[in-house]
Amino acid sequence: MAKIKSTLDIQLDLTRPVEDLTEVISAVIASQPHKRKEILEGLDIAVGNALAEIQAQEDQKTDNDSSGKVS
């Protein structure tokens, strides 16, 4: 029985992650133009969640730093 896969083999240059990730996203969207909106919405949610987590950590650090100061 034949096995058919649609895959991308990717090598990312970690010294330029934004550029390489953008190229990967563009390649995926080009291969799935009918799912463009779904793909971008999923990425938007994932990126938004990651940014919210970073912001929460930064806020917690700021709160901890300021709570130790004497006025």
Image: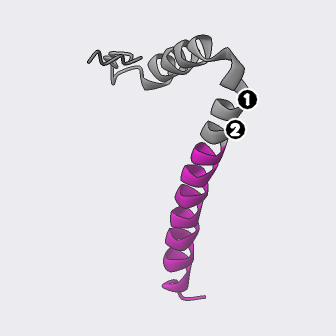
> Up-down: is 32 above or below 71?
above
Q: Which mark is residue 37?
A: 1
- Outermost residue, bottom direction? 70
From the viewer's perspective, tell me whether residue 63 is left or right of residue 16: right
From the viewer's perspective, tell me whether residue 65 is left or right of residue 12: right
Residue closer to the observer: 7 or 12: 7
**Residue 1: percent from left, percent from top:** 26, 18
- The amino acid pointed to by label 2 is Glu
**Residue 56: percent from left, percent from top:** 57, 65
From the viewer's perspective, tell me whether residue 57 is left or right of residue 32: left
Q: Using the rendered view, name the quadrant where residue 41 is placed.
A: top right
Q: Residue at x 45, y 17 (%)?
A: 20
* Tags 2 and 1 touching, CB below 8 Å: yes
Q: Using the rendered view, name the quadrant where residue 31 is placed.
A: top right
Residue span colored magenta: 45-71
Task: Give the overall secondary structure of the magenta segment.
Answer: helix
Is residue 11 magenta-colored? no
Residue closer to the observer: 7 or 58: 7
Image label count: 2
